[in-house]
Amino acid sequence: MDSREMARIAVKALEDKKGEDIRIIDISKVSVLADYFIIANGSNTNQVQALVDNVQEELFQAGVEAKQVEGYNTASWILMDFGDIIVHVFSQEDRLFYDLERIWRDGEFISTQDI
């Protein structure tokens, strides 16, 4: 499965659980880490964990397992590494604090409708 299809599945999983302010950044031309960063936030700890659970479930059903998941217990910033895509799910406060969109502004921002 290509990285764009993985990103599409992850975005839909986030949308299905009402993830807030979902952003996709194509970092393939500026980094070897991954092709896409997907960033979203939830309104509380339970929602953040539900967003992560849904992304993992939907990608698993598509045949893709996370290589690593960090931060699940605290649920303020959960990072899911699927190789070609990296999904970041934040609490509202931590998303503002870490501001990944600013850090990765050299990447290409893609609309969720265009993925």
Image (tube, helix red, strand yellow):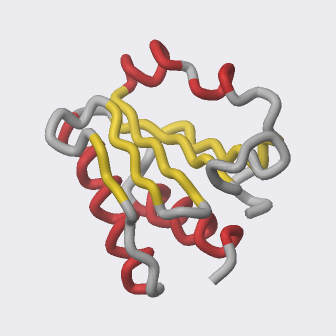
Asked which quadrant contains residue 22, the reply is: top right
Asked which quadrant contains residue 3, the reply is: bottom right
x and y, in percent, of residue 114 in the image: 79, 61
Q: Is residue 66 above or below residue 95?
A: below
Residue, x 49% and y 41% (percent of image)? 40
On screen, residue 28 versus residue 43, left or right, reads right
Q: Is residue 5 above or below residue 52?
A: below
Q: Is residue 68 above or below residue 75?
A: below
Looking at the image, which residue sits at the far top?
97
Residue, x 36% and y 38% (percent of image)? 42
Q: Nearer the viewer, residue 1 or 115?
A: 1
Q: Nearer the viewer, residue 55 or 72?
A: 72
On screen, residue 69 versus residue 30, left or right, reads left
x and y, in percent, of residue 89 in the image: 41, 41
- Quadrant assignment for the N terminus: bottom right
Residue, x 48% and y 63% (percent of image)? 82
Asked which quadrant contains residue 44, the reply is: top left
Residue, x 39% and y 85% (percent of image)? 61
Q: Nearer the viewer, residue 63 or 55?
A: 63
On screen, residue 112 versus residue 93, left or right, reads right
x and y, in percent, of residue 112 in the image: 69, 54
On screen, residue 14 versus residue 39, left or right, reads left
x and y, in percent, of residue 69 in the image: 31, 52
